[in-house]
Amino acid sequence: MNILLRGGTVVSGVNAKKLDVLISGSKILKVGKFLNTKDAKVVDVSGKLIFPGFIDSHTHFDLEVSDTVTADDFSSGTKAAVCGGTTTVIDFATQNRGETLSQALNNWHIKAFSHSSCDYAFHMAISDFNENSKEELKAMFEQGVSSFKAYMTYDAMKLNDEELFSLLSSLKALGGIVGVHCENDGIIKSLTKDKKENGTLSVLTHPKVRPDLCEAEAVCRLLSIAKAVDVPVVIVHLSSKEGLDVVRKFRESGSKVYVETCPQYLLLDESRYELKGLEGAKYVCSPPLRKKDDCKALWKALKSGEVNTVATDHCSFTLDQKSVGLDDFSKMPNGLPSVETRPVLMYTYGVCKKRISLEQMCRLLCENPAKLYGMYPKKGVIRVGSDADIVVFDPKADSFITKNTHHSRADYTPYEGVRTKGKVESVYLRGKEVVKNGELVLENKGKYVSRNKNTLI
Ligand code: URP
Ligand code: ZN
Ligand code: ZN
């Protein structure tokens, strides 16, 4: 039976209008005023905001890293995602050195298949860029992988400048896009060595060995390489004003650069590392949390449109896993959980605080990631013919974030006790109501999304 969502305010990247939405099967059949109710189950959504399902284009589920594996796999991670209104995640299929890209992609299909509660796609993180991986790029596109990831730090994964140049050149012909983790590895290693020799190994040292200039230098080097090749690139999880200034400089001289940031770089700052023991460990991620001024600069860049997407970089660990690095920060697995909380945080601290508009929130969390990663207009918009991925959001509800009710396997949230405005009331995934009255009612309905090329201008 068709479903008619009646009387809500439908949000897009350009406006927010009172419109009805008619869902037929997995697709949106009609969007308009006073739609006919014949043969449809009518759901009164008056007073609610109707968003396209949110897209989180940066998650790490079931990732082996720092001699451990992330607390969330696709089962728990996608449950958390969909309960927070995210209907599609793009996770990083990660090539271990010695593996082919096809093996890595196959590994991630096995991890995700049949136990994902939201739709999923994969970027391919390339750790071993050799002649064989180069040959395999075309096959990646044929299997719906149109975006790639490179790291400029982390011994097990980093590519050097020559490899980056070669990867970007190979993808230029194919039209793919690369997202890059930008931090200067040499500075991090040298500062870490110094600190270890001086015996300053607590969590407080973590941000000190990864200062903002590490990010700015790596952004500058990446953008120089991309300029030499003449291709657009994505800076993932941009955290600093210094890094942003470099992006501005390159854009002024004609470079095409896309920028992603994350809620932690907008809402949390480095004072968290002063918290003792495991309290401070909760916030160890790379790049690290920055100063309040960096948060402010990033909010302004969201408002001005200089940042294109807000994703989470959800990479979750339990406190027990984090505790491995309590006496030596460099051994601590890096990353934070936030796949469930990003939409409500962006609504509360972005829209309600008037730092961004409702339409901008929709662009940052829905439209832009859908376009940038080749899923638009199937995903990212409420439009005739699009997948019926819909979030019914109650803008009036008051709530707060707590680990006691979240769905991540991490036994903490970096936002414990944070008050929120608005609540995800229900979620439709390709026409099926998977979240009802805030509760997950249908599990494991997620499907693989095969993607095309970037269409974000
Ligand atoms: O600390 C983080 N962000 N861990 C996840 C891996 C990455 O760098 O994106
Ligand atoms: Zn990264
Ligand atoms: Zn990441």
Image (spheres, rainbow, N blue to C red):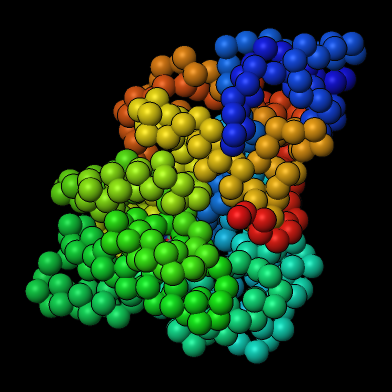
Q: Residue furthest left?
A: 198
Q: Position of residue 439 (x, y in %)?
A: 59, 23
Q: Is residue 124 left or right of residue 300?
A: right
Quadrant location of the N terminus in the rendered image: top right
Image quadrant where residue 435 sits: top right
Image quadrant where residue 18 sits: top right
Q: Residue at x 84, y 11 (%)?
A: 37
Q: Residue furthest right?
A: 39
Q: Residue at x 46, y 47 (%)?
A: 305
Q: Residue at x 75, y 75 (%)?
A: 138
450 is higher (above) or lower (below) than 402? below
Q: Is residue 44 visible?
A: yes
Q: Position of residue 331 (x, y in %)?
A: 30, 66
Q: Position of residue 304 (x, y in %)?
A: 42, 45
Image quadrant where residue 46 sits: top right
Q: Is residue 145 left or right of residue 362?
A: right
Q: Position of residue 177 (x, y in %)?
A: 61, 66
Q: Is residue 278 visible?
A: no
Q: 208 or 204: nearer the eye?
A: 208
Q: Is residue 51 left or right of residue 110?
A: left
Q: How many numbered marks does the figure carry?
A: 0
214 is higher (above) or lower (below) than 9? below
Q: 163 or 364: nearer the eye?
A: 364
Q: 150 or 195: nearer the eye?
A: 150
Q: Residue at x 61, y 55 (%)?
A: 457
